[in-house]
Amino acid sequence: MSAERPTAEELRRGMTVEIVQEDADPRSEDTEPIIGEIGVVYGDEPDGPHVKLKSGVVGHVRSVAPDE
């Protein structure tokens, strides 16, 4: 996986990612990312892969969270 934003093909259910909520501006530096596990990957969009987290939050992936 590249250091840049992943594609929908690179994402899998259960991966921990940082997302920007669907109704937030993904280009804004002030937008606080949400970290959670992927429940559903919907596909690629211009703002990043569209996913639904297991918590129910829907948004666009900014990055994959690093393994701890």
Image (cartoon, helix red, strand yellow):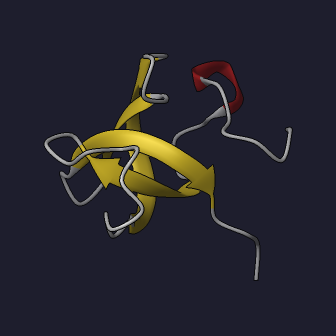
Which residue sits at x=41%, y=53%? 19
Q: Is residue 55 left or right of residue 66?
A: left
Vertical arrangement, residue 19 with respect to residue 35, above or below: above
x and y percent of residue 22 in the render?
21, 40
Q: Residue visible at 42% across and 62% down?
A: 29
Q: Please tell me which residue lies in front, 11 or 34.
A: 34
State whether residue 15 appears in this view. Answer: no
- The residue positioned farthest toward the bottom in the image shown: 68
Foreground residue among 64 and 46: 46
User: Which part of the image, by quadrant, shows the C terminus?
Assistant: bottom right
Q: Is residue 20 left or right of residue 24?
A: right
In this rendering, position of residue 62 left or right of residue 66? left
**Nearest to the observer: residue 40 or residue 6:** 6
Q: Looking at this view, is 38 or 8 the one in front?
A: 8
Residue located at (73% from left, 69% from top): 66
At horizontal 66% and vertical 39% (from top left) the residue drawn is 5
Q: Position of residue 1 (x, y in %)?
A: 85, 38
Residue 38 image position (x, y, % from top left): 44, 48
Location of residue 16 (image quadrant)? bottom right
Q: Residue furthest right?
A: 2
